[in-house]
Structure formats: C-alpha cells, structure tokens
Amino acid sequence: MLYAELAELYSRLEKTTLKTLKTRLVAEFLRKVEDPDLLEIIPYLILGKVFPDWDERELGVGEKLLIRAVSMSTGIDAREIENSIKDTGDLGESIALALKRKKQRSFFSQPLKIERVYSTLVKVAETQGERSQDRKLKLLANLFMDAKPEEGKYLARTILGTMRTGVAEGLLRDALGEAFRVDVPLVERAFMLTSDFGHVARIAKLEGNEGLSRVEMQVGKPIRPMLAQQAAGVKDALREMGGEAEFEIKYDGARVQVHKDGDRVIIYSRRLENVTRSIPDVVDQVRAHLKPEKVIVEGELVAVGENGRPRPFQFVLRRFRRKYNIDEMIERIPLELNFFDILYVNGESMIEKTLSDRRRILESVVEEGEGIKLALKLVTGNEEEAERFYREALEMGHEGLMAKRLDSIYEPGNRGKKWLKIKPTMENLDLVIIGAEWGEGRRAHVFASYLLGAYDAERGDFVPVGKVGSGFTDEDLVKFTEMLKPLVMEEHGKEVKIEPKIVVEIAYQEIQKSPKYESGFALRFPRYVSLREDKSPEEADTLDKVAQLYTLQERMRGKKV
Ligand code: ATP
C-alpha cells in the first residue's frame, strides 16, 4: 500500500477538528487495508508511532540525525534546513521544503510503500552498537530519497514522535468499530486486556465480534491498570464500599505490572512502558520470590531511605530513566516492591475473581523477602480502626490509604468507585494551555503566564479555570514559549490565544466558585508541576472533574482528615 495514501490521511486529519469526521476518515482508511499483516501496524502509524509504547524498541533518532539524513538525500546543506525552521516553525515543514527543492534526482526513484517505510524504521530501531548512527543515517537517507515533500513531512513527525493529528486511542477504538462493524465495547475490552491495537485490528477484521470477545490477556502484553477515585476520608470510603473494605497502604512510588514466564520477566510502568532493563535488581527478586511459572502481578515500587522510610517517588523515576551505570544506581537508590494485586496465574485469568479471592491467591504465590513485600492491609468495617491505620500510614511517610471493595472484580483501565484513595491533600489537575501572556522586563521575551482550560462537554470546548505563572524555572518559560509559539491563534496586545494541545499538571491551594471565568470555577494559587507529554488534550481533566473535586474539597472541609 502506498505511503502517499497514509500521508493523505494525516493531512486530512490535520485539517479538521471534528471528531466524527476524523473517526470516519480513520475508519475508511482502515477498511481499505486488505493485508491483515499490514493492518497490524497501521493503527500505530495512525497514532504517529512505529511501535506500541510497551515495545522496548526505540528509533533513537534525534532532530540532528534526521536533518543530516534529509541533507544527504537532497544535497541541501544541513544548516540551511535547520535555519529554515525559523520561517516554517516546524521541522516537518522544513523537511518538506527541502524535498521540494531537491537538487539530486534519482533515476531509480520509486513510490514509497508503507511496508517499506515500516521495515526501514524497524531496521533503524534495531541498529545498535558501533557506528550505529552512520548506519541509521544511511537507512533514513535512502527513505527520504524516495519521499515526496508531503510524505517527508509526516515521516519526520513519525520519526520524532511529533505527529499531532488529534487521533488518540478513543478515536481509534471508535474507528475500528465503524470500519469493521464490530461492537465498540468489545474493541475497548480487547484494548484494555492486551494494549495491542494492531492485534485487535486484525481480529476485528478477520473474526469480528466473536473473535474480539475471545481475546484474553497474555503474559508479555500489558493490561490497562485499574484506577482509583479520591474519597473525602475513611468514613466516606467505608460508606461507599458498603460498610466494610480492604484498606491498604497507598505507597508513594511508581506502579509496576510484573509479567513472569519461567525465567523471563518483564516489568511495565504505570504508562505501560517496558522498564525491565533499568531495574535488574527487582527482576532478580521477582525471579526468586514469585512462585508460579506464569504470572502477572501488580505492585508499587518504592525507593527506601537509610532509615527504612519511603523516599519521594521521583527517586524511583530516576531509576527508570537510567540506561548506563545501573549498578551504581542500585546502590544509591534501593527499591522495594509492594505487591497488591494478581491478574493471571498459569493460564488462568484472575480478574473475574473478587478482591478478597485475588488477595488470598496473591498471598499464596508471593514469598516475602528483602525487596519484595505484600502491601500492608487491614480488612475492617470499623471506622476508628481504619482511621488509626490511616494515621499510622501517614506517620510512616506514606501517601495515605487505598480502600478497595471486597467483592469487586478487577476492571482494566477503569477509574471507578471500587478503589478509592484517601489522602490529606487534593489531587493535582491535568489542564490544557489555551492562552498565554507575554512577560515584562526580564521576561519580556517569554510567555510568563498561561491560561488553563478544562474541557466542557456541554460547550464542546475548553473553558478557562485559572491562570498560572508560578512554579516555572526560567528554562521552563523559554521551553514553553518555543513550544507554544507555533500554536498561537490570535493576539490581543500582550495576550494570545493558544490552540489547545499542551497538557500540564497543576497543583493549587483550593478550587473556588467564581464568576470570573465562564467555567464557574477558579483555581486559587495554581502552581505548575510538570509537562504531561504523555497526555493528549482529550485525556486531560474535564470541567466535570473540576466540579467533582470541588464537591470533594467541600466534603473534606466538613470533617477532620
Ligand atoms: P495519575 O493518573 O495522576 O498518574 P494514578 O491514577 O496513577 O495517577 P491515583 O489514582 O492517584 O494514581 O492512585 C492510584 C495509584 O496509587 C496506583 O496507580 C498506584 O500507583 C498507587 N498505589 C500505591 N499503593 C497502592 C495500593 N496499595 N493499591 C493500588 N494502588 C496503589
């Protein structure tokens, strides 16, 4: 199948903001793919990726190398391509421009096929070791040699992971339903159980609803984690759980999903990235302490300090990011894994079992030891006892408690009320930047404050809930300014309106009811915490969530927690 057809799809997707239209475009494209093997890779390419997030392979190609490859294939100086970014505002556009001006024409130039693009990118990812940069360069230059300008633009965006066509997982799911006339909830279920959109697409096409309903979890493919909502306190949680609950320590670390098949162990992060290589110490412990041959379990990985108290979760993330000198990191940041759930044992799914049953089975398969523990728990219907456990958890330096419904099954990917978190502070919000304001004096060349929006389903648009200017370092401000400049839609004096694309995590002192914004809410003392590159605007928090948290905050105020 021609890559030009895919480039045409990207281009059409970019031209509309209408979700229904985007869904139809993707569905029509999926239907056109005849070869089931090709169909397995198409969903990732549509999302702007080459591999699923949980695949360990990475292209390892940065802007510099990409520009060199384009330079090699066009005969245009790399500096010239780089300089043109100032005018085009985007490397993809600059590459398209370079391809238009191409000086050398190959006699053997042939139309690019999707299959060739994909297999070349796989080769690029698998090229390692000595002189790997040079070999990657050649592979890429060859590809760009045959790319038309439009194709080159989207190739570049795929390679750099900067495709922004507004297609997220939800849209892909709906499009699969439409393309192959299968039930969307069944597609969703298969997504949640396998995280493998390619495989799900294949099954949807070849086996329809029946095939989809037979999809089961597999060791080696991450399952979407079940998530929690926040409760106002222990009492509220008990009421919600029907009078009795399993309370567990809410560890402040990083969630991991551990897959074990004999000696093979794979560990996935909360975002389902394969982090196995960075934590060989944990892998060894898992091999030694998890008894079943084949098993999938979940737990929280915590960094422990000298006194045995937990250290902030950023320490665990430092371990995850490490590629070199891992031994040194093992010494500096020892980890402890606290298991809290079991999803699969020796060919049998556990997720339909109740929490109580799962916990019992978990206890029978985990042998506690150094670095491997079961999450501390208390099953009770007694409020005072639970409050005491909560206080102890906080005194020990943990984040709070989780309350879990005893008779609840494990619902992959769901954030319902079967699991509730209890902690003393309100959770942060992930909001979308919808406007900005130029700074003054020393900050005159950067945007110094940012208007934050939450999606209002009724209006079908983002509405403002606050303006944030604190929590940024000078470097952050420069970075955000660069990132947002191409997204400016309108300018009014010092204020600009920004296309809603960038998601940020925001802490705040409280949510106030306020007539100032059309949302009806305003954040008091908002503070920037982090850039959520892993979230699209569709995945950010909504106005409904803000309203929900406001109610929760008022309930928390009504009692001592
Ligand atoms: P975000 O979406 O902001 O990344 P989250 O949804 O992962 O956060 P929360 O909803 O605040 O996190 O709480 C659930 C998380 O708490 C789990 O994903 C897990 O990482 C962590 N956790 C710690 N201890 C436990 C426990 N005993 N049981 C379940 N989850 C626990």
Image (cartoon, grey):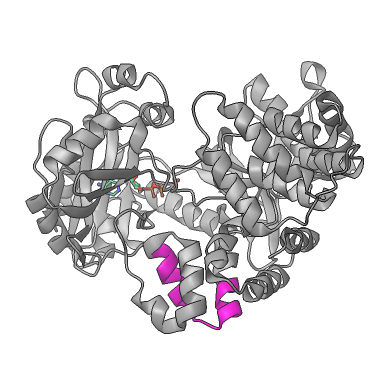
> Which range of residues does the magenta coloring cover?
174-192
The one of 314 and 514 positioned closer to us in this rendering: 314
The residue shown at (74%, 62%) is 13
| Residue 129 drawn at (x, y percent) | 49, 27
Magenta residue check for 305: no
The one of 157 and 173 positioned closer to us in this rendering: 157
| Residue 34 drawn at (x, y percent) | 61, 74
Answer with left or right where residue 283 lies relative to residue 412: left
Q: Quadrant of the N terminus?
A: bottom right
* Depicted 233 relative to depicted 113: above or below: above
* Depicted 380 relative to depicted 243: above or below: above
- Residue 358 appears anywhere in the view: yes
The residue furthest front is: 107
* Depicted 338 relative to depicted 517: above or below: above
Q: Quadrant of the C terminus?
A: top left
Answer with left or right where residue 557 lies relative to residue 541: left
Magenta stretch: dominant SS? helix
| Residue 390 drawn at (x, y percent) | 22, 42
The residue shown at (13%, 52%) is 292
Answer with left or right where residue 198 lies relative to residue 285: right
